[in-house]
Image: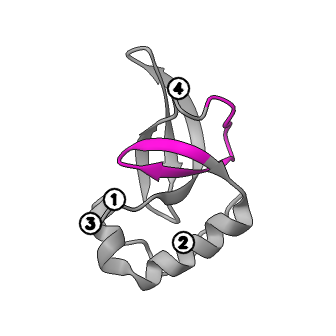
Amino acid sequence: MCLGIPGRILDIHESTGLRMGTVDFGGVRREVCLAYTPRADVGTYVIVHVGFAITEVDETEAVRTLDVLRAMADAVEGEIGEPLPDVRESPR
């Protein structure tokens, strides 16, 4: 199964010529390529698929989607390598 997971950009930097960032998926943080979302900035929510941010999404939709994905723990764990924490962190 392939999922696009919403997450919030925590920082942005360049790595080997690519725009990269650390993205928080409700408590799980991963390095993500931001090349396909050039207008996304720190604090922006993006949909991430196989390590690439593919589009921006608003915070309300991101939180709602993360809640649904928590209910589908096995699918999320397969996509990002570990389950989402049960406790929702403050988005800001």
Q: Hey, what amino acid is under mark 3?
A: Gly
Marks 2 and 3 close (CB-CB < 8 Å): no
**Magenta residues?**
38-55
- Mark 1 secondary-structure assignment: helix
In front of the other: 24 or 56: 56
Q: Which mark is residue 78?
A: 3
* 56 horizontally vs 75: left or right: right
Which one is earlier in the sequence, the residue at label 2 or at label 3? 2
Q: Hey, what amino acid is under mark 4?
A: His
Marks 3 and 1 close (CB-CB < 8 Å): no
Q: Residue furthest bottom?
A: 71
Mark 4 to mark 2 CA distance (whole Å): 25 Å
Mark 3 to mark 4 CA distance (whole Å): 27 Å
* 60 horizontally vs 66: left or right: right
- Mark 2 secondary-structure assignment: helix
Marks 1 and 4 close (CB-CB < 8 Å): no
Give the number of callouts.
4
Q: Which mark is residue 58?
A: none
Residue 31 % position (x, y): 41, 41
Marks 3 and 4 close (CB-CB < 8 Å): no
Quarter of the image with the N terminus is bottom left
Which one is earlier in the sequence, the residue at label 1 or at label 4? 4
Residue occupied by mark 2: 66
Q: Which mark is residue 13?
A: 4
Mark 1 to mark 4 CA distance (whole Å): 21 Å
Residue occupied by mark 1: 80
Quadrant in the picture for residue 2: bottom left
Residue 59 % position (x, y): 71, 61
